[in-house]
Image (tube, helix red, strand yellow):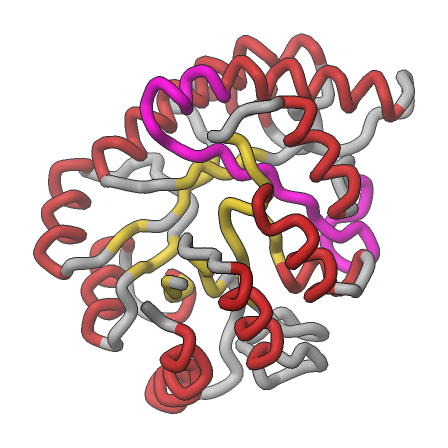
Amino acid sequence: MKFSASGGWWGKDWYDKVRLGARYGFPGVEQLGWLGLDFDLAKKTLEENEVTSTAIVIQSVNKDNMALTAWSHGMVWEDSRPAFIESFRESVAAAKAMGVPNIIATTGNERSDVSREAQFEICVETLKEMSKIAEDNDLMIVVEPLNILVNHMGYYLVTTEEAVRMVKAVGSPKCKILFDIYHQQISEGNVIRNIKNNIDLIGHFHIADNPGRCQPGTGELNYTNIFKAIQETGYDRWLAFECGRTVDVGDLVRDMHVLIDPFSK
């Protein structure tokens, strides 16, 4: 198991966050946006600090593509497919330039004009096309369910069960689930059971406590038990903190290393 720090915890810019991640003992730093980066400088910064940028989201320099792939439209719409494919190719190029292993895909908000099953099939077909590109480039698409009770009202993909059904329908070894522990705790609970039952289909994790979406130890989730359960499955990919903090950086770093070091590779 490998742990990635949240880019929002510290630093002035993308590059500074990488340097501070290394200084604070994290082998990965997760910063999802990539537009505007100098890829040569980003790669140099990552390599010099022996840090991995662990995931990016699908973006495009084309504003029309960004509008079609935004949650207000999104993957659930048939006419967004060309924009997703083009944006995904751009994101693959960014990921390869920086050595990023995961590209996050989201479905967008649910439509009211067609059935959920029709939207499901549209997403599957788009993901199938993107998965071919991912396979050719040895990158992982991770599809993210989100909660609709607190943070993302109206979002289409919510439950682990439906996410599992989606990635199985895509049928690619390079398309898996991003299991955000915070979101799934809110949506359905049964975090450890859902993780262990579906670990072969999980390609990435996000970490935050609930309520509050801050660092572990601030809410109701027992992360020691969750990490132990994940470790027992043999999972060896990244777990990324995606959360705020309630303490200064020194205390945060100390507390998070006490929590994760027994489970780190």
On the rendered image, what quadrant is the N terminus found in? bottom left
Q: Report which quarter residue 67 is drawn in.
A: top right
Residue span colored magenta:
131-154
Q: Position of residue 242 (x, y in %)?
A: 51, 62
Left/right placement of residue 247 relative to residue 264 reads right
Q: Position of residue 14 (x, y in %)?
A: 28, 54
Residue drawn where x is 80% and y is 47% of the image: 153
Does residue 48 lie above or below 128 as drawn? below
State whether residue 42 appears in this view. Answer: yes
Q: Position of residue 226 (x, y in %)?
A: 60, 72
Residue drawn where x is 41% and y is 24% of the image: 134
Q: Report which quarter residue 218 is drawn in.
A: bottom right
Q: Is residue 186 magenta?
A: no
- Give the number of marks: 0
Left/right placement of residue 248 relative to residue 119 reads left
Left/right placement of residue 163 relative to residue 148 reads left
State whether residue 64 appears in this view. Answer: no
Does residue 56 lie above or below 6 as drawn? above
Residue drawn where x is 61% and y is 78% of the image: 225
Does residue 71 lie above or below 217 as drawn? above
Q: Is residue 148 magenta?
A: yes
Q: Position of residue 229 (x, y in %)?
A: 59, 69
Does residue 51 lie above or below 108 as drawn? below
Residue drawn where x is 72% and y is 74% of the image: 211
Q: Report which quarter residue 35 is drawn in.
A: top left
On the rendered image, what quadrant is the C terminus found in? bottom left
